[in-house]
Image: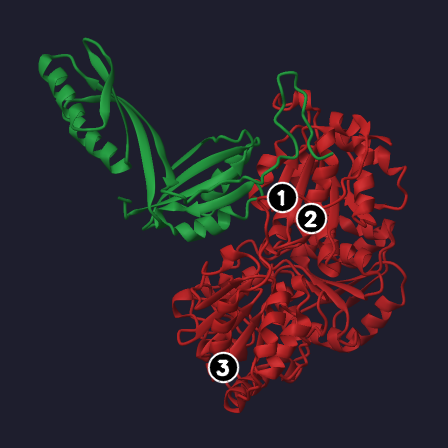
């Protein structure tokens, strides 16, 4: 169930220094309203993947996509919220558990969500959840009355369902990232 | 061949066909300056400020369509380029800037003259590089020129640490295809896009073409003319579109926008079809976007997909190379006539002519409009003009019709004062056979007038025209209209420009009346190197028509007809 108020873009980018800076700079200078931006490695060591979530009421996903593809280090961009896709947001939520009631409540609430308690002590517990963003929001909402003392979220990652594959199979880097000796492997010379 | 990074830079410049580079030496770029001594084929022009180098490279690029090259040292040398880079970015001018950087080991340590120029220029370059390994250098040089000149052209910066410039490797120039998986400029239109556009053209009764800088960039002047003539579609030009089609062509209405011809602006507002070619609906062209051309269908063809539906929503948007797309389209463009529509535009033009100051009786005061108009006549209307920014720029656009592409250069998007003189110097290097006139105001000229020394040292034949009204004229005009004539910080002291020129050993002349203008052109032509002519003009001239910022495009402030009163 895609969240209708949000648009989600996925970008394959070259795994080079400064690429995140270029993307962030573009989003800022074009005044695009970004909800979350995540970046991580892919199965190809030369390619990183970004997921960018924007508030659809304030920004136009197509406009952002057409600007992103202009960046030389951005290999491909897809507006995944236009098609069936899976999206996940992960959160670590530290809640107060300094009495029996709160400990029981946290346990009960977690049972109703794809969440689990990953750390628990006499004062606080850490709840972990990885789910669609609105489900994470709902869990946070339920935990709030108990007392959230600290929280961290990864931002949304997304992927098209089925054979909607975004890859860069033909991609061949000019140079590898430096190996531990500070030496480069040069390709294509 | 074992070459240093610096020598590799020069080898790559040679292979890109570079014949001149504009720059200023300094510590971190010295290895490359030393390598230049082995490459006398490439002329180095020593500027007086790095901003001048960037504008010269830009002017060279705009005049020729080839990539202009600027070179500077690290830190302040690099940051001084930034205004020139941003100017080139806004106007899609192909440029490669090479900057020295502190050695790799000291990057990030706030070393002497260290500055994160790649970080600073991310927003104002098409792409930039910090060279981390000398083995990357040949590829980066090649990619940089490729990126700068293809697609929507723009500036590319290459930052080269000093130790990379010194490091030696076996140099092999990379041949074959340039591999840039993330760089794929669009080229041709799909059949669906073409038929949708043609359908709109077939049904149009009051069509108007809006031709911009993209016509020049893709070399589509001939295609534009064929489209316009075959379907009898009037053409309005953007500021940077001047020269896209001969301005004496009966179908060319004039320049659109804030200080454009009223006939263009009324025409755009009443049109039932706009065909926007290589332009980007800048706010100085559209006025209020909410009331812009309310009853028209719109076709937008531009090489940059992010321009389509950016400012104005269109019915058919085609991201592609203009020349290719128009060539695809032309065989199916119908022969049409729009006599009523063209007659209506003629009426607006005649009304505009009646109001035109150059057709009014001379009051004895020298007007900027007259100077440009008479310069146009005296130069046979065929000069390459480079204007600065302000009233004189708009007067140039209004009173100097251009017949050929690449003969009117100006800073349109960024509106960079100080662009005129250095860009004219660069243009002359690119087009030595053109008669180059730098037309500048007293304000903008003083921002980069240090380049007089460059023009003199290199003996560059540029004719410098200063329209001196002792004001920042355009700002004063805004103060008159919108700030109740509070002329704050616009009256301007200037040096005696004739004496100033004398200090540089540059021939100069001061003109105070209209009958001297022709003589001044002869004077300019009688000297070999740079010449400066100061025209002392009426202080409080107003550029009409004017669409106030954000107002509806048809809500222009017009000059009254004779007998209708003063302002």
Circle on res. B202? 3
Can you identify the residue that label 2 sits on?
Answer: B146
Classify residue B281 as left or right of residue B53: left
Question: Which residue is rendered at x = 80% and y = 76% of the image?
Answer: B518
Q: Are marks 2 and 1 in contact (CB under 8 Å)?
A: yes
Circle on res. B404? none
- Within-10-Å neighbours for mark 1: few <14, some 14–19, many 20+: some
Can you identify the residue that label 1 sits on?
Answer: B180
Classify residue B61 as left or right of residue B565: right
Q: Nearer the viewer, residue B203 or B439?
A: B203
Q: Which chain is red?
A: B
Q: Chain of mark 1?
A: B
Q: Position of residue A140 (x, y in %)?
A: 21, 29
Q: Which chain is green?
A: A
What is the quadrant of residue B373 in the picture? Answer: bottom right
Earlier in the chain: of badge 3 and badge 2, it is: 2
Classify residue A30 as left or right of residue A96: right
**Helix, strand or loop under label 2:** helix
Q: Are marks 1 and 3 in contact (CB under 8 Å)?
A: no
Q: Is residue A113 above or below residue A101?
A: below
- Within-10-Å neighbours for mark 3: few <14, some 14–19, many 20+: some
Instruction: Work out how far the residue at label 1 is from the one at label 3, CA to CA, in angstroms.
Output: 40 Å
């Amino acid at each position: 169930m895609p969240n209708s108020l949000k648009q989600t873009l996925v970008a394959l980018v070259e795994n080079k220094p400064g690429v995140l800076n270029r993307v962030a700079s573009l989003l800022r200078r074009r005044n695009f309203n970004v909800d979350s931006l995540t970046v991580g490695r892919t199965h190809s060591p030369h390619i990183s993947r970004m997921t960018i979530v924007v508030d659809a009421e304030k920004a136009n996903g197509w406009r952002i996509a057409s600007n992103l593809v202009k960046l030389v280090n951005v290999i491909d961009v897809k507006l995944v919220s236009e098609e069936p896709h899976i999206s996940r947001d992960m959160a670590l939520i530290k809640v107060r558990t300094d009495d029996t009631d709160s400990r029981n409540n946290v346990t009960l609430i977690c049972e109703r969500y794809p969440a689990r308690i990953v750390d628990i002590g006499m004062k606080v517990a850490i709840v972990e959840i990885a789910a669609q963003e609105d489900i994470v929001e709902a869990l946070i909402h339920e935990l709030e009355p108990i007392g959230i003392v600290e929280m961290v979220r990864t931002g949304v990652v997304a992927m098209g369902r089925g054979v909607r594959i975004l890859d860069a199979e033909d991609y061949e880097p000019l140079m590898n990232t430096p190996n531990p000796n500070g030496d480069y492997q040069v390709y294509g010379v | 061949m074992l070459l240093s990074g610096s020598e590799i830079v020069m080898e790559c410049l040679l292979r890109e066909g570079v014949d001149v580079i504009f720059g200023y030496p300094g510590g971190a770029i010295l290895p490359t300056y030393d390598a230049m001594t082995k490459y006398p084929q490439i002329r180095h022009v020593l500027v007086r400020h790095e901003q001048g180098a960037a504008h010269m490279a830009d002017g060279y690029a705009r005049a020729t369509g080839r990539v202009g090259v600027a070179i500077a040292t690290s830190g302040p040398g690099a940051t001084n380029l930034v205004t020139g880079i941003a100017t080139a970015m806004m106007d899609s001018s192909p440029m490669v800037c090479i900057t020295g950087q502190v050695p790799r080991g000291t990057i990030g340590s706030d070393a002497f003259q260290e500055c994160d120029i790649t970080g600073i220029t991310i927003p104002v370059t098409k792409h930039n590089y910090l060279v981390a390994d000398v083995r990357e250098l040949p590829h980066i040089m090649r990619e940089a020129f490729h990126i700068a000149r293809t697609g929507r052209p723009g500036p590319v910066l290459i930052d080269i640490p000093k130790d990379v410039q010194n490091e030696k490797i076996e140099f092999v120039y990379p041949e074959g295809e340039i591999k840039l998986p993330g760089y794929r400029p669009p080229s041709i239109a799909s059949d669906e896009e073409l038929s949708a556009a043609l359908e709109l053209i077939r049904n149009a009764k009051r069509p108007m073409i809006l031709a911009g800088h993209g016509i020049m960039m893709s070399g589509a002047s001939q295609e534009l003319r064929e489209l316009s003539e075959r379907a009898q579609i009037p053409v309005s030009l953007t500021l940077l579109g001047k020269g896209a089609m001969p301005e004496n062509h009966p179908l060319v209405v004039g320049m659109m926008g804030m200080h454009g011809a009223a006939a263009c602006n009324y025409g755009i507002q009443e049109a039932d079809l706009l065909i926007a070619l290589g332009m980007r609906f800048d706010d100085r062209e559209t006025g209020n976007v909410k009331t812009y051309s309310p009853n028209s269908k719109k076709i937008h063809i531009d090489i940059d997909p992010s321009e389509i539906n950016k400012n104005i929503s269109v019915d058919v948007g085609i991201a592609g190379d203009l020349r290719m797309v128009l060539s695809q389209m032309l065989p199916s463009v119908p022969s049409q006539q729009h006599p009523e529509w063209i007659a209506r535009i003629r009426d607006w033009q005649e009304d505009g002519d009646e109001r035109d100051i150059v057709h009014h009786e001379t009051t004895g005061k020298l007007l900027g409009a007259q100077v440009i108009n008479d310069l146009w006549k005296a130069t046979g209307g065929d000069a390459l003009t480079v204007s600065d920014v302000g009233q004189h720029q708009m007067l140039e656009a209004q009173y100097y019709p251009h017949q050929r592409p690449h003969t009117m250069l100006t800073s349109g998007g960024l509106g960079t004062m100080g662009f005129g003189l250095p860009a004219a110097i660069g243009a002359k290097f690119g087009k030595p056979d053109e008669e180059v006139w730098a037309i500048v105001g007293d304000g903008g000229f003083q921002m980069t007038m240090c380049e007089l020394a460059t023009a003199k040292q290199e003996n560059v034949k540029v004719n410098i025209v200063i329209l001196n009204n002792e004001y920042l004229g355009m700002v004063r005009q805004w103060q008159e209209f919108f700030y109740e004539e509070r002329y704050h910080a616009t009256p301007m002291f200037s040096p005696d420009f004739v004496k100033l020129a004398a200090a540089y050993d540059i021939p100069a002349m001061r003109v105070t009346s209209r009958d001297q203008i022709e003589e001044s052109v002869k004077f300019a032509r009688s000297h070999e190197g740079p010449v400066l002519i100061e025209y002392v003009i009426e202080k409080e001239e107003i550029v009409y028509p004017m669409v106030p910022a954000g107002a509806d495009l048809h809500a222009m402030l017009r000059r009254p007809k004779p007998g209708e009163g003063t302002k």
